[in-house]
Image: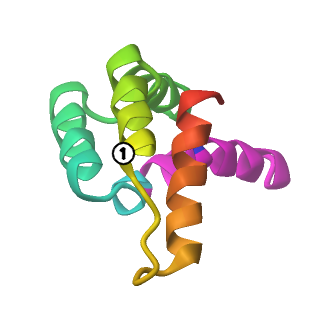
Amino acid sequence: MDLIDYIDGLSIDVPGIPDYWITARLNTAFKRPASIWYTKIKEIHGRRNWPWWKSQIIQKYSNGPWIWKNTISFQNDKYSVDKDPYEWCLRQSKRLKVMDP
């Protein structure tokens, strides 16, 4: 949900920013499966404004199965001394945000 917070903050910082400036850049903001999801939704529904996309993102990534998947990943991801502690902490922090925004 960092993306939503960032875009909402941008909308406040830059009053009157056109929706098409925001939505035109969404594809670059999404990675791997999320990018595929975005492309498919855009093909089906066409060009939409930011509030519509915001509701779609929340609906897709704030549902029970998504939260459950991240909860399991959080519980199963154990720190290993041969990996970067910063990356592990950051990954776990993001999972916590998903579980309890």
Would residue 48 be visible to someone looking at this image? no
Q: Is residue 12 magenta?
A: yes
User: Is residue 81 shown above or below 68?
Assistant: below
- Percent x, y for residue 26? 41, 52
- Percent x, y for residue 42? 24, 37
Image quadrant in which you'd find residue 70: top left
- Percent x, y for residue 64? 40, 15
Quadrant that contains the N terminus:
top right
Would residue 49 be visible to someone looking at this image? yes
Quadrant that contains the C terminus:
top right
- 29 to the left or right of 34: right
Q: Is residue 55 magenta?
A: no
Residue at image position (47%, 24%) is: 62
| Label tally | 1
Q: What residue span does the magenta drawing correspond to?
A: 2-25
Towards the viewer: 75 or 26:
75
- SS assignment at label 1: helix
- 99 to the left or right of 23: right
Say how the picture is coloured.
rainbow
Read off the residue under disc 1. Answer: 76
Q: Name the main secondary structure of what is drawn in magenta.
A: helix
Residue at image position (68%, 44%) is: 5
Residue at image position (33%, 36%) is: 47
- Percent x, y for residue 36? 18, 47
Three-letter code, disc 1: Asn
The residue most toward the front is 81
Packing grade of label 1 (10 A; few <14, some 14-19, many >=20) is few
- 34 to the left or right of 78: left
